[in-house]
Image (cartoon, rainbow, N blue to C red):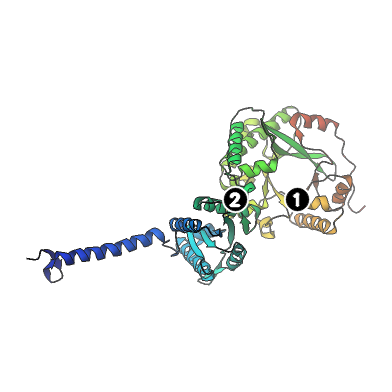
């Protein structure tokens, strides 16, 4: 007698042979397995491979041993689309970008979504990154509304930049953030931009220790004078952090910023800068010297209100007026989540702290930025100032910046003034102030007081004379 099982169908109980039941169960399990596999491998919004599946692809390519490149793409303004138009439109934008990337993919190329607004492409052609950037430069139109799909792309090549899937992915992401920081659309992985290399991790740990040591001698501040070009009077100083490592000696300031910029130590660094510089302004005031100090802040500092609260608390504690503090921001900071940055800048403006746009002329600034932001000052990048005496193009750029800033009611400070000829040329061009070794090098606080006591203003040159 054939064993059977009782199943309930639409017309009532049905007795089926167990072999058929087993076959039916296998069929259902197979379908379920395929569905599960699809959800495990594919991104539900775009239909692309997900991060887990990409890892398997990369591991297989590494085992094959052939050369290939991994491109990691991050959309620049996706969060703004989500915030302004909602997540449904955001998802549609992601799907449209995915279709565009898939449509352009060559033979053997793999496209994946890593999560959020990040995508990845595995390709044999490292130069493909530039073509992808051009492809995404064209806006995506949804319901008649053009949406920016551009972003930054990081490139890591196998085997040059890593021999494991996880290493390649991390280094492609590092290159992508490097591209964002430099205002470019594409960057190839470079060890000097890797904040996670063993040497940099050690240096970062040493910096954290130095910052967390109250009154530690490793961290110091030097102050470079800023001079009014009409009167020759010193109108302020820029505070410049110096780190003297106990083993390595003085750490290059540019290297210091590269090490700390994308780490959590950046917050500690900013706190130390605010605390020490505001306290120094209070000590100078007690000695009868009232100065304004410019403090550099990073992109990350402008994404929260902490810098505003910290300044307000320290200025109150040290008896320092808001007009004695000025924050310098870079043009690149304005492009990283502009809405949050603008909210922080407006809070600083309400606090009474002046804002200066540093390295003007080298980045993204536009008339729109200059009109919308609560700026008091722009600083002309030293690269233009250093060449203005011998290069007519640099001289023309400097004059144009001065005229533009003047039309908007902004004060202009020229950086990198190293000689009298440049100083006088800036004065005749209508520049407001100058900073550079011609007037004074960066110096410790006590030395600055001594320098101020000896300083005699240079005779200004009246514009047009």
117 and 3: which is toward the camera: 3
Snapshot quadrant of residue 188: bottom right
Does residue 419 appear in this view?
Answer: yes
Which SS class for mark 1? loop
Residue under label 1: 381
Q: Are marks 2 and 1 in contact (CB under 8 Å)?
A: no
Most extreme residue toward the right is 465
Snapshot quadrant of residue 138: bottom right
Side of 52 relative to 256 (left or right): left
Residue under the image location 11 percent in, 69 percent down: 12
Side of 454 relative to 15 (left or right): right
Residue under the image location 69 percent in, 50 percent down: 375
392 and 14: which is toward the camera: 14
| Residue 156 % position (x, y) | 58, 55
101 and 297: which is toward the camera: 101
- The answer to whether residue 434 is above or below residue 44 is above
Residue under the image location 65 percent in, 31 percent down: 318
Specify which label sits upstream in the sequence, 2 or 1: 2
- The answer to whether residue 222 is above or below residue 392 is above
Crowding near the residue tagged with mark 1, few <14, some 14–19, many ≥20 C-alpha atoms within 10 Å: some
**Total label count?**
2
Disc 2/disc 1 C-alpha distance (Å): 22 Å
Residue under label 2: 341
Which SS class for mark 2? helix
Q: Give the quadrant of the N terminus.
A: bottom left
Snapshot quadrant of residue 3: bottom left
| Residue 268 % position (x, y) | 59, 37
């Amino acid at each position: 007698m054939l064993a059977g099982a009782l199943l309930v169908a639409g017309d009532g109980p049905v007795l089926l042979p167990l072999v058929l039941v087993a076959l039916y169960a296998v069929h259902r399990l197979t379908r379920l397995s395929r569905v599960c596999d699809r959800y495990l491998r594919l991104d539900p919004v775009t239909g692309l491979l997900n991060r887990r599946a990409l890892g398997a692809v990369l591991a297989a390519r590494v085992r094959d041993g052939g050369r290939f490149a991994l491109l990691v793409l991050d959309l620049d303004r996706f969060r703004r689309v989500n915030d302004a138009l909602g997540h449904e439109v955001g998802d549609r934008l992601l799907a449209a970008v995915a279709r565009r990337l898939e449509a352009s993919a060559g033979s053997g190329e793999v496209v994946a979504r890593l999560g959020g607004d990040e995508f990845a492409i595995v390709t044999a052609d490292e130069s493909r990154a530039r073509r992808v950037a051009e492809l995404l430069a064209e806006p995506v139109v949804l319901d008649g509304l053009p949406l920016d799909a551009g972003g930054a792309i990081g490139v890591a090549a196998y085997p040059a930049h890593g021999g494991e899937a996880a290493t390649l992915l991390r280094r492609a992401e590092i290159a992508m953030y490097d591209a964002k920081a430099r205002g470019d659309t594409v960057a190839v992985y470079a060890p000097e931009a890797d904040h996670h290399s063993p040497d940099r991790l050690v240096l970062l740990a040493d910096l954290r220790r130095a910052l967390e040591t109250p009154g530690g001698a490793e961290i110091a501040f030097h102050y470079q004078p800023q001079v009014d070009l009409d009167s020759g009077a010193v109108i302020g100083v820029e505070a410049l952090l110096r780190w003297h490592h106990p083993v390595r000696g003085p750490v290059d300031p540019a290297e210091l910023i590269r090490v700390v910029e994308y780490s959590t130590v950046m917050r500690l660094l900013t706190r130390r800068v605010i605390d020490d510089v505001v306290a120094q302004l209070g000590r100078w005031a007690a000695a009868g010297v009232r100065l304004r100090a410019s403090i550099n802040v990073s992109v990350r500092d402008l994404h929260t209100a902490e810098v505003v609260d910290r300044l307000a608390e320290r200025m109150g504690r040290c008896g320092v007026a808001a007009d004695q503090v000025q924050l310098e921001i870079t043009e690149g900071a304005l492009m990283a989540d502009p809405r949050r940055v603008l909210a922080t800048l407006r809070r600083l403006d309400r606090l009474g702290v002046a804002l200066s746009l540093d390295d003007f002329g080298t980045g993204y600034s536009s008339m729109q930025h200059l009109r919308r932001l609560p700026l008091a000052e722009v600083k002309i990048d030293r690269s233009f100032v250093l060449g203005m005496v011998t290069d007519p193009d640099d001289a023309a750029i400097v004059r144009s910046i001065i005229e533009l800033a003047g039309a908007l009611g902004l004060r202009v400070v020229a950086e990198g003034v190293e000689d009298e000829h440049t100083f006088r040329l800036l004065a005749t061009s209508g520049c407001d102030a100058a900073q550079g070794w011609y007037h004074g090098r960066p110096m410790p606080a006590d030395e600055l007081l001594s320098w101020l006591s000896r300083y005699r203003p240079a005779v200004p040159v009246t514009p047009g004379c």
